[in-house]
Structure formats: structure tokens, C-alpha cells
């Protein structure tokens, strides 16, 4: 047995050892993971579930190659939520996976150690090799927390090291201790692990209190900066004003900041189209490359800057520690609509994409509250709607300021997001009153972390990951859909002597006309009908489809040219109706599949699809009829 209380054996791992990072939410575990692995990480799903696993690789100072696994945050091995179940099962080796850990690094927030100590003691009782990493030591010192590391290690019976994930060299001590421990650790797969029983869990809590008193001294003072900021941000009136202002600035930035980069991307695709047009290729092949690929895919990729800006705001707010405050602030409002306070973070995440938003509902313990959040998360305005919104707003809403400082286009975008939020609150209110009537939910309890500056490296990794996901989507789903749309819009070829545009004789025109009786009350034309169908696979495909259709119809595929085409052929009532449709339209196929997997039922997937389709049709119908009555037809 070594000094840390871990059994040793002279067995060296034949493969790269697996180091699992386990810790409470908001302990800085993911920042530590990013600091250790940098860009050498990948994201996949655990077998049979939609829970993501993040795995990275690194080489220690001793030259040892390690696999680092970032497990979902947990407070205890009792596992009250799906995320915590995954962490428990990986720790116990129950999951058929390639991430069975050889060593568990329990990551604790050094400024708030009580919960981390309890978790460390629970992990120790499992029987796996464990060490404790005291993260965010810089914050602990600022708060007057003094930790006797040697005494803490003796009391816990496991090695303890200090780390600061956001500082250069802040992980050196951690890596050195891992190297030392791995010299003699047995393979994780060679042992039989067990979960602590209820008595052991209670004992871990009492033991954590004793260890805390023995090894940790604190002045009891809360960080003065955090307290001063919270006095404003958690105020029931001022806090809401700040939250709305932040959201408003975010949506204004989506338009204002992105425009220069969008112009560059758009000019690039226009240049490519010109090269193809001037090439000696046959006309049909030119049409395939220029109208199908370049116009279709380019009209979607041009919106990448806006999507990156949206993710930038969300990641910064998460890293700052503001998200937990926003959830606390919104608890009363969301509770009145039948949502749990913890639903705020999944719903806000759904602004970027509903899939991770739905997956993050695992932080909600109560199954009814979690299901309600899953059902309404698709109503939040995901980034896939941005291309549709931007195209229509840019074509029909003047680019001018109102009240002397607010961009009208950004204001309309804010209104669309607000409509989605209002729709989600309304639907959750109905669900609570119809399905869960008289059944009280669990109280909302949340630990507020200290504020900390976002780390540039972690922010860059997050943005890069999300940008590449979007570009891969454009290169796979969107590309394949554009090829299909081009084929439908190009064949059959027009007969000899035809007087109508060639696309009028195509399969796309036939299909769009077939749907016309259903969508005519909404003000939709056959081109919109064709775009709606592939838009079920991915919403942004609708813009690419319109780009291909109008390019084949004699226009250009660039976003501005599509805007000019629809502005000349659609009425304002039609444009507003299509915006209303996309506020509530059924989610992409991937989101519906995630709903089925997260709920374990086809029923709730079809319930989501059905109610959203009904809402979308009703909203578009009412918007079109009202707009026409007001003279916008």
C-alpha cells in the first residue's frame, strides 16, 4: 500500500490507461479536461444511450500516454438523473464501454469542498483507485479558504493535489501524481467493484463533515465581488431587466457583427459560381455544380458567422457562471408555467440546438418535469432557424434603426425568439394542467458558483467544435438534400418549344403543386412547399432548397439574390406567415429521434411532432389572414 492508501501491484497496463474525471457540477471539471487534452478530444455517445462521452488523450511528463474521460457531473453515486446514472455505471464498470477507468480523479471545487469530499469518500468505498484534485485553488485563496493538503490526504486516505485549470502549469502537480500512481496500479478490468449501500452513503456524509473540520479552515466570507454583482443580477426586477438586455444584445449582435464575414463568404461562393459558369462543362453539369451544390450549400454556409456568434454568447455566459443565476431568477416565472427552474438551462441551450438542450434535461430529477421540458424544448429558436429568419427578414424588413439606436431587423429577430419562448411557456402550462394536474413537482435547489472569467482556450475549443459540427452537417445532410432538390427541380426536362421556365415542368413543381390545396390558405406557393419537405430533415435545408429552386428558375443562388427573388415574388403576408410557421414548425428528424430515445417512447415523439405541426399551421394561417386583412397581401 502506498502513502495515499492505494493498493499496489507490479502490473503495467498494456494499453493507454483510462483516467476518469468525476466531480460535482460547476466544479471546473470540464475546464480541467480541456486544459489537459486541448484539441485532442472527441465526442461520442455511450452505447445504447444519447448521453455524450468526451474522451481526450495526453502525454504525461514521464512520457506515458493517457486517455482522459470527462464524466457527467454528479453529487452522489445514488444516481437520481440519467447523467448521474452514466457516471455511476462507468465508475462501477457496469457499462459495456471502452472507458472503464484505471484511476478516478475526483475533481473538487476548493472553495466549496463539502460536497466534493462526500463524493470522494463514496468513490473510495467503490474500491477503485481514487485521487482528489483540488481545482480552482486561486478562487479558494481569494475567499480566505485554507486547506492543509497533507492533512486532508491523511484523513481521506487518498492522494490529494492542487490544480488551477485556467493557469499555465496549473495541472503539472496533477499529472506528476498520476504518473506516480500509475507506476503500480492494477488494471481496472481485473477487479470486482461494488456500489456503496445506503448506510455507506450516510456514513460518507458524516465522514466528509469530520474531514472538512480537520483539514479546512475558512473565514466564512463570501467573495465580495460575487456578492455585489449578485445583489443586482438576482434582484427580482433588476435581474430580469439585465437578462432581457443580454438576450436583446445577443440577437442584435447576430445581425450586426456577422454581416462583414457573411459578405466575404457570400462573395466567395459567388466567385465559385462564376468560375463554373465560365467553364467548358455541359450546361446540365454546370447547373448541377452551380445551382445544386454551390448555390444550395453556399446559401446555408453563409450563415455560419451568425451561428458562431450565438454560441459565443452562450459559452461565455456559461463560463462566467451566469447561467445558474439566470435559472434561479427564472424559477418563479417558469414555475408559474409548469416548468422546473432547472429547465432554464436546457431551454437556453436549445437556442443553439434542441438536441443538446433535450439531452441536458437529465439534470432534472423529477420525471414529469423532465418530460415537460423535453416536449417544449423544440419550441425554442434553435440556430438552424437562423438562416430562414435572416433570409426573410433581410428581404422584407428594412435595414434601419428605430428609436434612434435599435436595428429594426434585430428587433424582429428578438420578437421571433420571444414568440418561441412564449409558445414554450404556454404549452408547458397546458401540459401541467392537463397531464400533471394536482401533482406537485420537486422544489428547486441550485448551488450558485462564483463568477470567473472565461478561459480563451476553452472558449475557442467550444466554438471550433460547434462550427465543425455545423460544417459537417452542411457537407453531409445538407449536401445530399441539395443534390436531391436539384434533381427534382431539373427533371424532366421541358418539352421542345416550351414557353414556361424549365423548372415549371419539373418533379419539384409537380410535388409543390400537389400540396398547394393544403398550404394555399397560408399564402405559400409551390416553391415554399418544396422547401418545407427537406426542411424536416434539417431546417436550414429550406434556405438551400429555395436557393437551388430560384437559381434554376433563372436567378442566382447567393443569399442576397435569393432575397431579391422572394421579395419580388412573395407578398409580405406570405413572408410573415412563413416566419410564423418556422417559429412552431416540427423539429428536424434528428431532434425527433433524440426525443424518442430520451423518453424511451415513440408516443412522445409523435405527440411532439403532432402538436408542433398543428401550432405551426394555425400560426401561419392566422398570420397570413390578419396580414392580408391589414393590406399586406
Image (cartoon, rainbow, N blue to C red):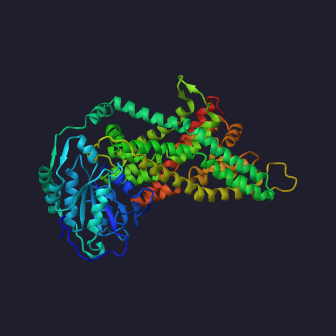
Q: Residue at x 44, y 62 (%)?
A: 44
Q: Is residue 444 visible?
A: no
Q: Examine the rendering and report whether any part of residue 430 can be seen.
A: yes
Residue 585 lies, in percent from the top left, at: 53, 47
Quadrant of the snapshot with the N terminus: bottom left
Residue appearing at x 43%, y 32% in the figure: 245
Judge left or right: residue 174 versus residue 56. left
Quick one: which residue is furthest to the right in this view? 497
Q: Residue at x 34, y 69 (%)?
A: 17
Image location of residue 56, percent across then percent down = 40, 61
Q: Is residue 55 left or right of residue 1?
A: right
Q: Position of residue 174 (x, y in %)?
A: 29, 58
Query: Foreground residue, 87 or 121?
Result: 121
Q: Quadrant of the C terminus?
A: top right
Q: Residue at x 40, y 41 (%)?
A: 317
Q: Is residue 334 above or below residue 173?
A: above
Residue 143 is drawn in which quadrant? top left
- Expressed as whole percent of the image width and height from the top left, the position of residue 312 reads 46, 44
Of the pair 610 and 596, the residue shown nearer to us: 596
Residue placed most toward the observer, 496 or 43: 43
Place residue 427 in its image quadrant: top left
Q: Is residue 183 above or below residue 547?
A: below
Amino acid at each position: 500500500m502506498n502513502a495515499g492508501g492505494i493498493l499496489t501491484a507490479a502490473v503495467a497496463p498494456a494499453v493507454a490507461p483510462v483516467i476518469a474525471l468525476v466531480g460535482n457540477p460547476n466544479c471546473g471539471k470540464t475546464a480541467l479536461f480541456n486544459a489537459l487534452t486541448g484539441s485532442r478530444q472527441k465526442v461520442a455517445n455511450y452505447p445504447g444511450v444519447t448521453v455524450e462521452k468526451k474522451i481526450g488523450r495526453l502525454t504525461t511528463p514521464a512520457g506515458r500516454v493517457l486517455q482522459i474521460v470527462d464524466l457527467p457531473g454528479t453529487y452522489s453515486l445514488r444516481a437520481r438523473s440519467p447523467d448521474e446514472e452514466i457516471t455511476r455505471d462507468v465508475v462501477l464498470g457496469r457499462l459495456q464501454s471502452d472507458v472503464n477507468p484505471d484511476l478516478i480523479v475526483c475533481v473538487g471545487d476548493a472553495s466549496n469542498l463539502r460536497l466534493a469530499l462526500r463524493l470522494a469518500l463514496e468513490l473510495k468505498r467503490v474500491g477503485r483507485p481514487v485521487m482528489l484534485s483540488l481545482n480552482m485553488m486561486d478562487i479558494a485563496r481569494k475567499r480566505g479558504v485554507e486547506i492543509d493538503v497533507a492533512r486532508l490526504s491523511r484523513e481521506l486516505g487518498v492522494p490529494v493535489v492542487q490544480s488551477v485549470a485556467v493557469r499555465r502549469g496549473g495541472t503539472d502537480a496533477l499529472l506528476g501524481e498520476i504518473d506516480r500512481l500509475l507506476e503500480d496500479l492494477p488494471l481496472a478490468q481485473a477487479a470486482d467493484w461494488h456500489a456503496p449501500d445506503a448506510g455507506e452513503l450516510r456514513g460518507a456524509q458524516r465522514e466528509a463533515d469530520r474531514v472538512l473540520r480537520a483539514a479546512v479552515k475558512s473565514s466564512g466570507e463570501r467573495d465580495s465581488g460575487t456578492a455585489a454583482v449578485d445583489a443586482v443580477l438576482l434582484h427580482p426586477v433588476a435581474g430580469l431587466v439585465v437578462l432581457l438586455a443580454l438576450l436583446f444584445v445577443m440577437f442584435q449582435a447576430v445581425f450586426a457583427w456577422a454581416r462583414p464575414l457573411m459578405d466575404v463568404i457570400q462573395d466567395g461562393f459567388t466567385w465559385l459560381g462564376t468560375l463554373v459558369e465560365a467553364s467548358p462543362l455541359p450546361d446540365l453539369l454546370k447547373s448541377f455544380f452551380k445551382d445544386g451544390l454551390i448555390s444550395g450549400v453556399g446559401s446555408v454556409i453563409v450563415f455560419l458567422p451568425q451561428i458562431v456568434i450565438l454560441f459565443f454568447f452562450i459559452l461565455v455566459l456559461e463560463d462566467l457562471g451566469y447561467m445558474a443565476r439566470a435559472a434561479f431568477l427564472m424559477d418563479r416565472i417558469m414555475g408559474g408555467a409548469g416548468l422546473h427552474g432547472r429547465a432554464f438551462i436546457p431551454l437556453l441551450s436549445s437556442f443553439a440546438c434542441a438536441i443538446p438542450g433535450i439531452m441536458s434535461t437529465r439534470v432534472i430529477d423529477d420525471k414529469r418535469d423532465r418530460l415537460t421540458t423535453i416536449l417544449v424544448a423544440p419550441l425554442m429558436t434553435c440556430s438552424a432557424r437562423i438562416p430562414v429568419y435572416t433570409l426573410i427578414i433581410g428581404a422584407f424588413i428594412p435595414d434601419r434603426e428605430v428609436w434612434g439606436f435599435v436595428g429594426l431587423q434585430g428587433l424582429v429577430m428578438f420578437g421571433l425568439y420571444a414568440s418561441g419562448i412564449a409558445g414554450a411557456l404556454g404549452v408547458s402550462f397546458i401540459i401541467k394542467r392537463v397531464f400533471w394536474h394536482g401533482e406537485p413537482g420537486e422544489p428547486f435547489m441550485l448551488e450558485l458558483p462564483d463568477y470567473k472569467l472565461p478561459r480563451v482556450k476553452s472558449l475557442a475549443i467550444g466554438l471550433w467544435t460547434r462550427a465543425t459540427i455545423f460544417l459537417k452537417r452542411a457537407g453531409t445532410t445538407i449536401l445530399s438534400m441539395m443534390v436531391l432538390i436539384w434533381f427534382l427541380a431539373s427533371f424532366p426536362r421541358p418539352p421542345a418549344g416550351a414557353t414556361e421556365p424549365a423548372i415549371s415542368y419539373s418533379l419539384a413543381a409537380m410535388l409543390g403543386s400537389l400540396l398547394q390545396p393544403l398550404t394555399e390558405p397560408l399564402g405559400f406557393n409551390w416553391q415554399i412547399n418544396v422547401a418545407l419537405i427537406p426542411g424536416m430533415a434539417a431546417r436550414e435545408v429550406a434556405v438551400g432548397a429555395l436557393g437551388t429552386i430560384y437559381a434554376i428558375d433563372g436567378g442566382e443562388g447567393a443569399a442576397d439574390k435569393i432575397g431579391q427573388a422572394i421579395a419580388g415574388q412573395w407578398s409580405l403576408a406570405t413572408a410573415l406567415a412563413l416566419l410564423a410557421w418556422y417559429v412552431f414548425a416540427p423539429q428536424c428528424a434528428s431532434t425527433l429521434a433524440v426525443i424518442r430515445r430520451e423518453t424511451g417512447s415513440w408516443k412522445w415523439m409523435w405527440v411532439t411532432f403532432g402538436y408542433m405541426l398543428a401550432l405551426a399551421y394555425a400560426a401561419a394561417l392566422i398570420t397570413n389572414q390578419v396580414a392580408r386583412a391589414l393590406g399586406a397581401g
